[in-house]
Image: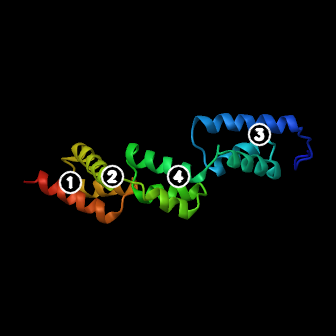
Amino acid sequence: MISEDGARLTPEQVRKVADRLRRLCSRREYCSADVMKKALQALEGDTGLAAEVVAQLQKEGYVDDARYAEAFVRDKSSLAGWGQTKIRYMLRARGINPDLIDSAMASIDRGRADVKLRKLIENKYNSLKDDPQCRLKLLRYVLGRGYAYEEANCVINNILEGKNK
């Protein structure tokens, strides 16, 4: 096997790269684009061999974009406190199919996400209580976390009205 730059890659080297990628993928989820980058780097830029290795890993079940998207959505919505907009954007940036993104986004527990949003805003409010631009800063903070303006504005209004009474 000859890589694109003319260097010879032995079948043994390709097998070692595939085994290394299997070990990585068995420890945590990776999307196919991430695995492709790692394969390209390990195989000295040979796109054909890298694509073959990634296809083999997908066939064996080590790489699954649907499973990756579901894990990513679950982690970022419940642990990191990201909103749907930011999660969608990050998945698209990783080359995940929009249909897979939609199905993964459907798994978000709206009740837990709303509670997480409220906690984020309340914690930030506690650090901004005396700031004259508190409302603006809260809104900017929540929009930066990927929440929609309408839902963020509603929660911020409820919190500010409750604190001003």
Taking the spot 74% from the left edge, 44% from the top edge, the residue there is: 39
Residue situated in front as seen by the camera: 134 or 102: 102
Q: Earlier along the polypeptide chain: callout 3 or callout 4?
A: 3
- What's the mark number on residue 69? 4
Q: Is residue 134 left or right of residue 52?
A: left
The crowding category of the residue bearing disc 3, from other C-alpha atoms within 10 Å (few below 14, some 14 to 19, many at least 20), is: some
Residue position for label 3: 42
Residue position for label 2: 113
- What's the mark number on residue 132? 1
Q: Give x and y (percent) for residue 72.
A: 49, 48
Q: Calculate the distance from the C-alpha at mark 1 to the C-alpha at mark 2.
A: 28 Å
Taking the spot 42% from the left edge, 55% from the top edge, the residue there is: 107
Say which amino acid is labelled 1. Answer: Pro
User: Above or below — where is 120 with respect to 11?
Assistant: below
Say which amino acid is labelled 4. Answer: Ala
Judged from the image, the secondary structure of the residue bearing numbered disc 1 is: loop
Q: Earlier along the polypeptide chain: callout 4 or callout 1?
A: 4
Judged from the image, the secondary structure of the residue bearing numbered disc 2 is: helix
